[in-house]
Structure formats: structure tokens, C-alpha cells
Image (cartoon, rainbow, N blue to C red):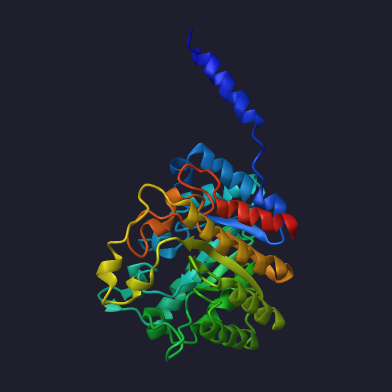
């Protein structure tokens, strides 16, 4: 029996692929209600496979730069801006009719702004100089892309539930805890047509929901423009997130705020032991799925995604966007955070193949 020639094998493969139904597009199924987004890495056009680029183009109508807009990466040396990676992403998204999220203007966490921000020669910079630099940065970054950015994460992770109610950082120490008011007013003046977002983690958690709602309400009462409150929603297997998300969306909606899930993924490896100092070393040894994730675990993950999207679609008039934090498991930050392991938290696996989670999300969007 003669073997199949290379050309014959290629033809047979092409015919087989042609018989497979085209993958449904999440962006088409959602129809912009809500926007369906993904985060995009800095060197996306070099490190993503053709299959990942295809997913990026066809599945999502919103993109968020993971790092290239963050101040410490964009301008590590005072006055030396690295716009080129941002320009490439903005041009790519525009050519594919995708909305762009400016992420982020200020991240209220030490280490998430350049070291020079707080220095004045050998001395520490005072509030006047730091504000001058912030206003200059906001003007350059937001001004460069004004009219092309759909929404801006103006401030990230300011609120803490324990006393004093905010994350203490160099920013709060030098500028005071009321600096968000001035920051939002600066942003609104530079790009008045863009949606302005306050973004934080675990907003759906009842204790944090109460504190964050109080925070954004107080800012609005002081004349700040806040259109959307973003919850990062880094979830885990077994999370009963749907009820909390439903409650979160409705409470913000009742006060005139829309919501967004800004960094959604579902970790398949429990993180609880990592947060306990006594068991952190034990947690750091967990790496159970180096050879792939079992079907049973993937189905449990799909259940979480399904419940999340049910809560979203039940309140779709009040949800601006759902953004997955990554395209495929291959590049997910969960492979490194909060410890290094092989993770499987997204809708597409390392080969850019759709997982049960993808089908769960598509199924909810299709029927809603």
C-alpha cells in the first residue's frame, strides 16, 4: 500500500478543517452588550502565535494593555517615554474595530510607578513637585491618545477595608488620602469624552463592596466624573461569585454607576494556603497540572464562568465590559502569580484551543 504524499496529506487536512464549524465569536454573540475584552501583552505581535492573533482579532471587541501603559514601564526615566508599544496596540485595535482601555493612569501600589516620581535630586520630592509630574504625565499620555481611548482606568486599588480605609503608599503619604479627587478631575479635563473608571480587586466581596461604593459615591459628590467601577474578578474554582456579582452590579446601578469585570480569570489551583504565612511554603510547592488539566477540573471551571456570565447577562444594561485577563493559558499571569506553577485559568488552552469555559461563556451569550 502506497503512502500518502505530502501534498495529499495537506489537502486531506485542509478538507477536514473545512468541515469543522467555524468557532463562534464572543464579540459577535454579545453584540457590544457588554463589550468582551482581553488583556494584551507588550510584545503581542512577536510572542503570540498566529492562532492567538486570530483569537485576539475575532473574539474580542475591547483590549487592555497589560503593562505598556503603566507609568513605570512607559517612562522609567524622567522625560523618556516609550510610546512605541502603545502605538502599535492602539493601531492594531483601531484596525480591528476594537475599543481600547487606558490601563492605568495611577496604580496606588508602591512599585507601580517610577522611582524618580518621588525624588528631587538627593531629597524627597514634595507634594507640589509630585503633582506637577502627575499632571504632566496625565497630559502627555491621555492627550496623545485622546479620542482613540474608550475608557481610562484612572485609579487602581486605592481602597482597603481595614483602617484607615485606603492603601497606604508613597502617594497617600506625600499627597494625602484625598488625592483621588484631584486625579479624577485632571483626567476628566484632558479627555472628557472617554469613560472614566475606578478599578479595584474583589469589589464583589460584601465588605469591599460597601467600602468601594462609599468611596466612589463620595468622589462623585465632590464633582468627580466616574462612569464605571471595575472589579478585577480574579476568581477560583468553587467561588460562589454569581450572587455576589449580581448584588454588586445592582447596587452600583441603583446609584448611577455602571460596572465592568476588568481582569477575569478562574484559577484552577487553590490559593488559600498562600495567604497564610504558616502554609505559604507548602502552597508554593503545588504544581499539580504540569501535564494538562483534568477534564473534571475544566468542567468545574466552566461552571464558574457560566455563573459569572449569567449574572452579567441578567444585568447587561448595567455592565460596560467583561475583560478576560489574557488570551490563552500559555501567557496567563496565573503561571507566575502568586507563585510559579502551570495554570489553566482562561478560555483557551496553551494550543489556543477552546476549553469548556469558552463553550460555557458562548452558550450564555447565545441564549441571552
- Give the residue at x 42% y 58%: 333
- Give the residue at x 59% y 52%: 358
Q: Is residue 99 visible?
A: no
- Above or below residue 10? Residue 186 is below
* Residue 22 sits in quarter: top right
- Above or below residue 231? Residue 95 is above
Left or right of 286: which side holds 230? right
Viewer-proximal residue among 191 and 366: 366
- Residue extending farthest to the bottom is 163
Viewer-proximal residue among 283 and 322: 283
Viewer-proximal residue among 233 and 123: 233
Give the image location of residue 93, x and y in percent.
Answer: 60, 49
Left or right of 300: which side holds 20? right
Give the image location of residue 351, x and y in percent.
Answer: 47, 42
- Above or below residue 355? Residue 238 is below
- Give the residue at x 57% y 41%: 54
Viewer-proximal residue among 368 and 195: 368
Q: Is residue 269 visible?
A: yes
Where, quadrant-wise, is the C terminus in this rendering?
A: bottom right
Give the image location of residue 137, x and y in percent.
Answer: 48, 67
- Residue extending farthest to the top is 2
Give the image location of residue 29, x and y in percent.
Answer: 71, 52
Count of marks overlaid on the render: 0
Amino acid at each position: 500500500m502506497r503512502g500518502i504524499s505530502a501534498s495529499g496529506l495537506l489537502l486531506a487536512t485542509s478538507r477536514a478543517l473545512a468541515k469543522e464549524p467555524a468557532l463562534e465569536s464572543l464579540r459577535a454573540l454579545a453584540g457590544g452588550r457588554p463589550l468582551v475584552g482581553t488583556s494584551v501583552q507588550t510584545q503581542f505581535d512577536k510572542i503570540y502565535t498566529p492562532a492567538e492573533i486570530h483569537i485576539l482579532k475575532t473574539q474580542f471587541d475591547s483590549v487592555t494593555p497589560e503593562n505598556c501603559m503603566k507609568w513605570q514601564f512607559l517612562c522609567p526615566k524622567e522625560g523618556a517615554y516609550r510610546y512605541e508599544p502603545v502605538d502599535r496596540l492602539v493601531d492594531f485595535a483601531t484596525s480591528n474595530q476594537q475599543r481600547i482601555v487606558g490601563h492605568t493612569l495611577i496604580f496606588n501600589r508602591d512599585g507601580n510607578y517610577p522611582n524618580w516620581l518621588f525624588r528631587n535630586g538627593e531629597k524627597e520630592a514634595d507634594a507640589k513637585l509630585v503633582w506637577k509630574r502627575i499632571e504632566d504625565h496625565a497630559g502627555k499620555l491621555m492627550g496623545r491618545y485622546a479620542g482613540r481611548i474608550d475608557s481610562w482606568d484612572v485609579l487602581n486599588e486605592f481602597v482597603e477595608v481595614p483602617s484607615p480605609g485606603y492603601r497606604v503608599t508613597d502617594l497617600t503619604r506625600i499627597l494625602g488620602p484625598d488625592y483621588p479627587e484631584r486625579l479624577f478631575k485632571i483626567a476628566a479635563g484632558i479627555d472628557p469624552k472617554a469613560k472614566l473608571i475606578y478599578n479595584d480587586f474583589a469589589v464583589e466581596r460584601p465588605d469591599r463592596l460597601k467600602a468601594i461604593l462609599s468611596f466612589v459615591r463620595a468622589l462623585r459628590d465632590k464633582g468627580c466624573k466616574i462612569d464605571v467601577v471595575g472589579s478585577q474578578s480574579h476568581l477560583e474554582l468553587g467561588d460562589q461569585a454569581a450572587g455576589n456579582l449580581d448584588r454588586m452590579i445592582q447596587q452600583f446601578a441603583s446609584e448611577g454607576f455602571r460596572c465592568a469585570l476588568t481582569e477575569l480569570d478562574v484559577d484552577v489551583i487553590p490559593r488559600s494556603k498562600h495567604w497564610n504565612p504558616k502554609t505559604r511554603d507548602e502552597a508554593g510547592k503545588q504544581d499539580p497540572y504540569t501535564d494538562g488539566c483534568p477534564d473534571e477540573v475544566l468542567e468545574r471551571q466552566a461552571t464558574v464562568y457560566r455563573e459569572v456570565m449569567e449574572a452579567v447577562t441578567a444585568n447587561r444594561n448595567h455592565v460596560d465590559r467583561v475583560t478576560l485577563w489574557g488570551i490563552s493559558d500559555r501567557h496567563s499571569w496565573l503561571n507566575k502569580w502568586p507563585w510559579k506553577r502551570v495554570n489553566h485559568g482562561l478560555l483557551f488552552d496553551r494550543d489556543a484551543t477552546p476549553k469548556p469555559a469558552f463553550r460555557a461563556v458562548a452558550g450564555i451569550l447565545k441564549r441571552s
